[in-house]
C-alpha cells in the first residue's frame, strides 16, 4: 500500500472542516493587530477612572474603542508601568475587573464576564434558560411556514441573525451545534452580551481546550422568527475566526434551536430555507424524491445506509448528518474491521477543530448507497485514530457529541449534488 504525502496547506475549519483559501488582506490585518499589541508603553495613573486609562491607550495606538459605560463605571485604578507590551497592560487591567477585550479593524472592544467563583450561583439563578433554551417561534402565529434566503460559502449555509436587536450578523447553520456560538465579536450596535460566564470547550484537534463565555437571557431574531431566553456562547480567539476562511463576514454558528420545533426544508439550488409548522406540513410524493429516515440521539440526526469498499464488500454504517462541514464523508477504520483505507490515499490536513489541527487520510471508496441510488467513487476522509478516540469518549463537548457507536459523518455534499431537499424535524 503506497502512501502519498502532500504538502498542501488547507485552511482550517470550524466544527469539522473548512477548506478554503485565506484572503491576503485579512491575514495582513491579523498580523497588524499582533504588532500593535506587541508595542511597549509607559503609563502612570493614580486613582484614575478605568475608562480614562483605556482611552489613553487607544489614543496612544490611534485606534477607536467601544465599551458599555456601565461596566467601567466607578472602577478606578493606580498603576505605574514602564516599557511593557500593551497586550500585557490590557490583560492586567481586564483581569482585575473581570473584563475581556478584542482588537480588530482598529477598534478596541471591552466586555465583562462572570468570574469563575461566581459561576455556580449564576448557573443556579439562570438554570431555566439553559435547560429549556426554548426554540424559535413565528412572530405571526397565523403563518404556516416561513422562508429564509441564505448565502453559501464553501458549501456552508449562512443565514442572517440578530441578537438583542443588534445589526445583522451572519451565522453558519450547523446541525451539530446545540447552543448558538459567536466566534467573532461583531462591531455592531446593541449586542450587549454583558453578563458572561467562562466555560471550557473541549474540541477536536491537537491543541488545548478553549475558554468560551456563556450569556443567558438573550433574544434572537431570524426573518419572521424570534427566540427568547437564549443562551449564547462566545469564543474569543483570533485563531478560531471564520470570516478570513470564507472571505465574507461570519460571526458564529446556530443549529439545534432552529431545527428542533419545525420541519426544515433546505433548498440548495435556490438558496432558500423553509420552516414549516409540523401540523401544517403535508409531504407530496414525487417520483424523484429519495427518503432517508432520520434517527435522533442526543439531539443529533443520524441516517443508516451502506458503503461499498474496493473489493465490493457492503458495510452497514450509521452516519451523523452535519450541515456545518464542507467535506463529503468521514469514516472511522476503528468502527468495523472490514473498513480499510483505500490503496491509493494521501495524508493531509483535514482542517481545524476547536482544539487545533485535524489530520488524517483521504481516498476514494467504491460507493455509498443513498436510498435506491449508489454514489460512485466518493472521496472519503479517514481521521487519525486519536481524533476518533476523542469523538467516541468526549461526553461534554459543546460543538459535537458523537456516541460510541459512531461510524462516520454524512455531510451535505451528498444531499446537494443530487438536488435533494432536506426535510428535518427534531423529535
Image (cartoon, helix red, strand yellow):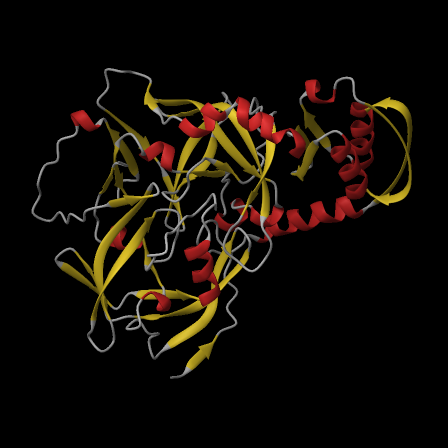
Residue at image coords 48%, 53%:
13
Q: In this view, does 231 lie above or below 423?
A: above
Can residue 115 be seen in the rendering of this structure?
Answer: no
Quick one: quadrant of the N terminus? bottom left
Relative to residue 60, is residue 197 drawn left or right? Answer: left
Q: Is residue 339 above or below residue 149?
A: below
Residue at image coords 12%, 35%:
283
Q: Residue at the far bottom: name it.
A: 1
The answer to which image quadrant residue 187 occupies is top right
Relative to residue 116, is residue 373 drawn left or right? Answer: left
The answer to which image quadrant residue 369 occupies is bottom left
Where is residue 22? Give x, y as percent. 54, 54
Where is residue 21? Give x, y as percent. 50, 56
Residue at image coords 15%, 47%:
291
Can residue 249 be seen in the rendering of this structure?
Answer: yes
Where is residue 367? Give x, y as percent. 23, 67
The total of numbered circles placed on residues is 0
The answer to which image quadrant residue 271 occupies is top left
Quick one: quadrant of the C terminus? top left
Where is residue 189? Give x, y as percent. 57, 23
Front-lying residue, 298 or 91: 298
Relative to residue 322, is residue 126 drawn left or right? Answer: right
Amino acid at each position: 500500500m503506497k502512501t502519498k504525502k502532500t504538502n498542501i496547506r488547507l485552511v482550517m475549519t470550524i466544527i469539522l472542516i473548512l477548506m478554503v483559501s485565506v484572503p491576503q488582506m485579512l491575514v495582513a490585518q491579523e498580523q497588524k493587530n499582533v504588532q500593535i499589541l506587541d508595542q511597549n508603553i509607559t503609563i502612570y495613573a493614580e486613582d484614575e477612572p478605568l475608562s480614562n486609562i483605556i482611552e489613553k491607550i487607544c489614543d496612544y495606538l490611534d485606534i477607536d474603542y467601544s465599551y458599555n459605560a456601565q461596566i467601567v463605571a466607578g472602577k478606578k485604578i493606580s498603576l505605574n508601568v514602564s516599557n511593557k507590551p500593551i497586550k500585557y497592560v490590557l490583560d492586567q487591567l481586564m483581569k482585575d475587573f473581570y473584563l475581556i477585550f478584542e482588537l480588530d479593524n482598529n477598534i478596541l472592544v471591552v466586555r465583562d464576564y462572570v468570574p469563575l467563583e461566581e459561576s455556580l450561583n449564576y448557573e443556579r439563578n439562570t438554570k431555566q434558560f439553559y435547560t429549556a433554551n426554548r426554540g424559535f417561534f413565528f412572530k405571526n402565529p397565523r403563518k404556516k411556514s416561513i422562508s429564509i434566503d441564505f448565502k453559501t460559502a464553501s458549501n456552508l449555509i449562512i443565514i442572517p441573525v440578530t441578537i438583542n436587536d443588534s445589526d445583522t450578523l451572519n451565522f453558519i447553520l450547523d446541525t451539530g451545534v446545540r447552543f448558538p456560538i459567536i466566534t467573532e465579536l461583531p462591531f455592531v450596535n446593541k449586542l450587549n452580551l454583558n453578563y458572561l460566564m467562562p466555560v471550557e470547550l473541549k474540541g477536536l484537534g491537537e491543541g488545548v481546550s478553549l475558554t468560551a463565555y456563556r450569556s443567558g437571557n438573550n433574544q434572537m431574531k431570524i426573518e419572521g422568527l424570534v427566540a427568547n431566553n437564549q443562551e449564547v456562547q462566545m469564543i474569543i480567539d483570533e485563531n478560531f475566526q471564520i470570516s478570513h476562511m470564507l472571505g465574507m463576514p461570519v460571526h458564529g454558528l446556530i443549529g439545534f434551536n432552529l431545527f428542533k420545533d419545525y420541519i426544515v426544508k433546505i433548498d440548495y439550488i435556490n438558496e432558500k430555507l423553509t420552516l414549516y409548522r409540523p401540523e401544517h406540513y403535508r409531504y407530496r410524493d414525487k417520483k424523484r424524491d429519495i427518503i432517508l429516515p432520520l434517527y435522533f440521539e442526543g439531539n443529533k440526526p443520524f441516517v443508516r445506509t451502506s458503503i461499498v469498499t474496493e473489493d465490493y464488500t457492503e458495510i452497514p454504517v450509521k452516519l451523523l448528518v452535519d450541515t456545518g462541514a464542507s467535506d463529503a464523508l468521514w469514516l472511522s477504520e476503528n468502527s468495523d474491521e472490514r473498513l480499510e483505507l483505500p490503496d491509493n490515499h494521501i495524508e493531509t490536513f483535514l482542517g481545524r477543530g476547536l482544539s487545533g489541527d485535524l489530520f488524517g487520510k483521504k481516498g476514494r471508496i467504491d460507493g455509498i448507497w443513498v436510498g435506491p441510488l449508489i454514489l460512485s467513487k466518493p472521496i472519503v476522509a479517514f481521521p487519525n485514530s486519536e481524533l476518533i478516540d476523542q469523538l467516541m469518549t468526549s461526553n461534554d463537548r459543546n460543538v459535537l457529541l458523537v456516541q460510541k457507536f459512531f461510524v462516520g459523518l454524512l455531510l451535505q455534499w451528498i444531499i446537494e449534488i443530487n438536488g435533494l431537499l432536506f426535510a428535518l424535524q427534531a423529535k
